[in-house]
Structure formats: structure tokens, C-alpha cells
Image (spheres, rainbow, N blue to C red):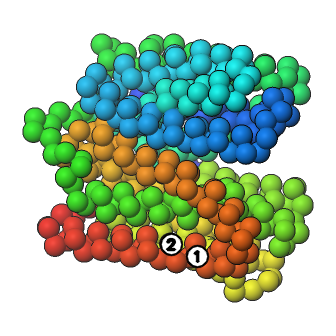
Amino acid sequence: MKKLYTNYINTFRGLSKEIWWLALMTLINRAGTMVIPFLTLYLTKNLNFSLNDVGWIMTAFGLGSVIGTWLGGKLTDIIGYYKVMVGSLFITGFLFVGLQFLTTFTEFSFGIFILMLVADMFRPAMFVAMSAYSKPENKTRSVTLIRLAINLGFSAGPAIGGLIIATLGYRGLFWVDGITCILATFLLIKVLDPKKTKPLDEVKVKNPISVYKDKSFWMFFAAMTLFGVVFLQFLSTMPLFYTDVHHLSELEIGLLLGMNGLMIFFLEMPLVQWLENSKYTKVGLILFGGVLTTLGFLVLNTTSWIGVLIISMILMTVGEMIAFPFSNAFAIERAKKGNQGQYMALYIISFSIGHVIAHNAGLQMVDKLGFEMTWNIITVLGGVCVLLLYLLKRYLKLKGEVT
């Protein structure tokens, strides 16, 4: 047991202190967005909006995220990741506090759009900063640590948010959300001031290749968008499947979803380190992650046995643990050819588009076609994603690029 613990701790060694600070700020930032999981409840119960109104507000939410991510990438290339991160976090804090004072449909739609536009400017800047403060051989593990912080933040956020609502109400939630973002800003200024910290792998490209002319990256972008549409069913249609078809209770669903988080927490870093030292290419590993995730949906139609839910969860979780870190590492590596901010923004946007499409499309398919047909369609989309990744792997090999 002691040896297992030592080996697990060793997988985190060698990462710079700046990466640990970035992980902590990401944890604060993600836990600080605790208002998001309760947004639909707040809009329907406190502001008495209809479900149709909420649907349009969530569309404004998604569009703000997409535009903000793109804008964050552009600004990162112009003024640098540090200024974008500081500005985004600080202004987001005040926008969260101000959101509670918007009560009409038009006001709230515009407010949530502006909030997400500013908040998601942080993401591409953060990934460029992470690349700058990581040694080349540590980039994939650095991504994995950031993912760990994001998962812990998303796990802790709703629990803390529920407690705040129970004691202080929804207004307290907006205040705490805003204050945590502002505190994270001061922490960022203290520990990542470029005058005091020296980047380990900051890339300055004299004649950058435009991301819009990088055919390989656009094949990758299309594959990741499809992967997002497939994987994100896990967050919206899958819980309904557990309830409506397998009649699981909320506690049982919570335990099953918790299994995903526990596997990621204990296994992702050791798995990534082992795969990093293997002979496989990043695209080959992303492809394998896509195959496992697709199989996670395929098995759901093979039997009515309840144990298939655990098998599906294991396949999807392992697929996620492989596909996400190595796809992020591929994007970072590819970004060295051009403007890093634009590359990282497009990588994040691929999943933002996935969010815009996945939840609504998945729920509509379940409503009109049923779960069995929905899983068949999702499996086909997963197959197209895998095919695109296979073609990308062949294309890169043909060009003499091994990534």
C-alpha cells in the first residue's frame, strides 16, 4: 500500500511551482462558478421564467462562452496571457455580483452573455500560461493536474453552493461567486507576476502559421467537436437513462457518477505518465480514447442487465482520461507553429460547440426517438470521430510529422 501511495505521489513530481499555483487558481475559479449548476432553478423558481425562456438564456450562455473563448485567444496573442487572465478574473467577479440585480428576460440574457464572454476569456490564456510554465516533457502531466483541479472544483462547487443557498439564499451565492473570482485575481498577481517569474518554455514565433490554414488542426477540431457531442451525453441524457430505463434512485445515480470522479482522481495521472513513456503517438492515444468512449455508449444497447451501466461508465471514464489530456497536449504542441492563443481558443471552442449542440440534440432525440435509437446515433457519431482521428494520423504520417 505504501509503495502504491509513493508511486502515485511520484507522478506529480517535477511540475513547476507555477503549474501548482495555476491548478489552485483553476480550482478556486471552477468552484467559484457554483452559481451555474443552480442557474435553471434560480431562473424558474426565483424569477418565474418559463422553460422556453430558460432555454434561450442557456443559448446566450453558450454563445457568450464561444465568443469569449475566441476573443481570449486573440487578446492572449496581442497583450499576453497574464493581462488577459488578471482582467478576466477581476471583471468576472463584479459581473457575478451584478447578475443578481437583473430580473427581466432581456436583462438576464444580456447579462449572462456578457458574464460568460468575460469569464471564458480566461481559459485560452490559462492554457498558454500552463504551456509557458511547463517543461516540454511535462506538458501532458501539467494538463492532467489542471484537469484534476477542474474536476475537484466542479465536485466541490455544487456542494458548497447548496450549503450557501440553504443558509444565505441565492443572493449569497452570487456574492460568494464574485468574491472568490476577485480573491483568485489577487493570488494570480502575487504568484505569477511576469516581472518575478520566469517562463520555462515560452514560445515566440516570428512568422506564425495561421491556425485557419492548418489543415491538420481543422481535422483535429472537427474530431474534437464530435467527441464533445458524444461525451457530453454523459452529463445530460445519461442520468435520464439511469432513471427512466434502469430506475436508479438519486443516491445510486450519485454513486455511479461519483465513480467517474474517483477513477479520474486516483488513476488519471499515473495512467497519463505511463502512456507518455510509451511508443504511442498523441493522435493514436486520442483515437484509442475515442474508441473506448464510443464503446461506452454501444454496450448500453446490448443487454438490460444493470451491470452494463458500470461497464459503460468504466469504458467512458478511461476513454476520457486518455482523450482529454493528450488532445490538449496535441493542441499545445501544434500551437508552437503559430499564434498560441488562437490555437488554444479553437481547441476550447470545439468543446463549447459540443456543449451548444450535445445537450439539446440529445434530449430532443430521446424525446422523439427513444434511448435505444439515441445511443445508436451517438455510437455512429463516435465512429465518425474515430475515423477522422485515423485519417488525421495517416495524414500526419504522410507529411512526416509524428505527433
Marks 1 & 2, CB-CB < 8 Å contact:
yes
Query: Relative to 301, does residue 61 appear above or below in the rendering?
Result: above
Name the residue tied to disc 2: 381
Q: Residue at x 69, y 82 (%)?
A: 301
Q: Quadrant of residue 130?
A: top left
Residue 199: quarter of image:
top left
For badge 1, the amino acid type reads: Ile
Seen in the picture, residue 346 relative to 305 is either above or below; the reply is above
Amino acid carrying mark 2 in the image: Leu
Kind of element beneath mark 1: helix
Q: Residues within 10 Å of mark 2 (few under 14, many from 20)?
A: some
The residue carrying pointer 1 sits among few (fewer than 14), some (14 to 19) or many (20 or more) residues within 10 Å by Cα, namely some
**Quick one: quadrant of the C terminus?**
bottom left
In the image, taking residue 386 as reference, residue 80 lies left or right, namely left
Residue 377 disc label: 1
Residue at 64% x, 56% y is 360
Question: Please, which residue is most extreme toward the left here?
Answer: 207
Query: Alpha carbon of mark 1 to alpha carbon of mark 2: how far?
Result: 6 Å
Side of 3 relative to 330 (left or right): right
Residue in view at x 47 percent, y 22 percent: 88
| Quarter where residue 55 is shown | top right
Is residue 51 positioned above or below 48 on the image? below
Decide: is 392 above or below 299: above
In front of the other: 106 or 325:
106
Residue 339 is situated, as x and y percent measured from the top left of the image, at 23, 38
Residue 336 seen in render:
yes
Q: Secondary structure at mark 2?
A: helix
Is residue 278 visible in the rendered structure shown here? no
Name the residue: 33% across, 14% down. 196
Please provide percent x and percent y for residue 53. 71, 40
